[in-house]
């Protein structure tokens, strides 16, 4: 396996000009240089493929340990951003609902306290005037009504 820090190389330089009778030898030398460059690039490709396979294996293992994670690992950046926006909207909605429930709870506590106060207080005496007003005036008393 080639070293990890290989960088692509520039194409081989053209072979120096050769005497007219040996142009075949010059082409042969260039072919040899190109063949060596191809072998080098193939080695780099193999190294990258090995790294990709290693990463895929790690991702599969992580997926077995944490089933939620592969969903995120298989997303591209745009999908992750959209998912994050959706999660933020969901969080905001939940926070609003929590605030609403807290307000309702506080209102119920206040109503309960008022009811407890009412139960603890003795009922007020009804003043006579209010009683007369509610029941109406008493019948007029006359001597005829007394039978003694």
Image (cartoon, helix red, strand yellow):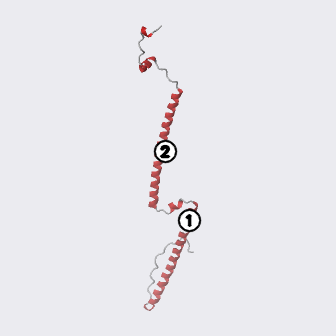
Q: Which mark is residue 4?
A: none
**Residue drawn 49% across the image and 41% down it:** 102
Q: CA distance from mark 1 to mark 2?
A: 38 Å
Q: Which residue is mark 1?
A: 60
Q: Position of residue 123 (x, y in %)?
A: 50, 24
- Decide: is 2 above or below 140: below
Query: Residue 80: x and y, percent?
Result: 47, 59
Image point (45%, 51%), residue name: 89
Quarter holding residue 19: bottom left
Query: Residue 19 versus residue 25: which sits nearer the camera?
Result: 25
Residue lying at 49% horizontally and 44% vertically, measured from the top left:
98
Vertical placement of residue 129 versus 12, above or below: above
Mark closer to the chain start, 1 or 2: 1
In depth, the one of 47 and 126 nearer the eye is: 126
Looking at the image, the residue that sits furthest to the bottom is: 21
What SS does tag 2 mark?
Answer: helix
Residue 98 image label: 2
> Residue 131's x, y, as percent?
44, 19
Foreground disc of the pair 1, 2: 2
Q: Residue at x 52, y 28 (%)?
A: 119
Give the crowd class for mark 1: few <14, some 14-19, many >=20 residues within 10 Å: some
Give neighbour class at mark 2: few <14, some 14-19, many 20+ (Cα, 10 Å). Answer: few
Residue 108 lies, with reference to residue 22, above or below; the image says above
């Amino acid at each position: 396996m080639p070293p990890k820090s290989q960088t692509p190389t520039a194409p081989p330089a053209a072979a120096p000009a050769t005497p007219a009778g040996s142009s075949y030898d010059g082409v042969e030398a260039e072919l040899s240089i190109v063949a060596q460059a191809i072998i080098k690039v193939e080695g780099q490709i193999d190294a990258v493929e090995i790294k990709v396979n290693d990463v895929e294996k790690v991702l599969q293992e992580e997926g077995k340990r944490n089933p939620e994670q592969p969903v995120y690992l298989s997303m591209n950046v745009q999908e992750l951003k959209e998912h994050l926006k959706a999660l933020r909207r969901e969080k905001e909605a939940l926070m609003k609902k929590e605030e609403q429930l807290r307000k309702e709870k506080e209102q119920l506590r206040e109503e309960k306290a008022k009811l407890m106060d009412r139960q603890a207080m003795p009922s007020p005496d009804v003043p006579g005037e209010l009683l007369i007003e509610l029941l109406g005036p008493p019948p007029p008393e006359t001597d005829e009504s007394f039978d003694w």
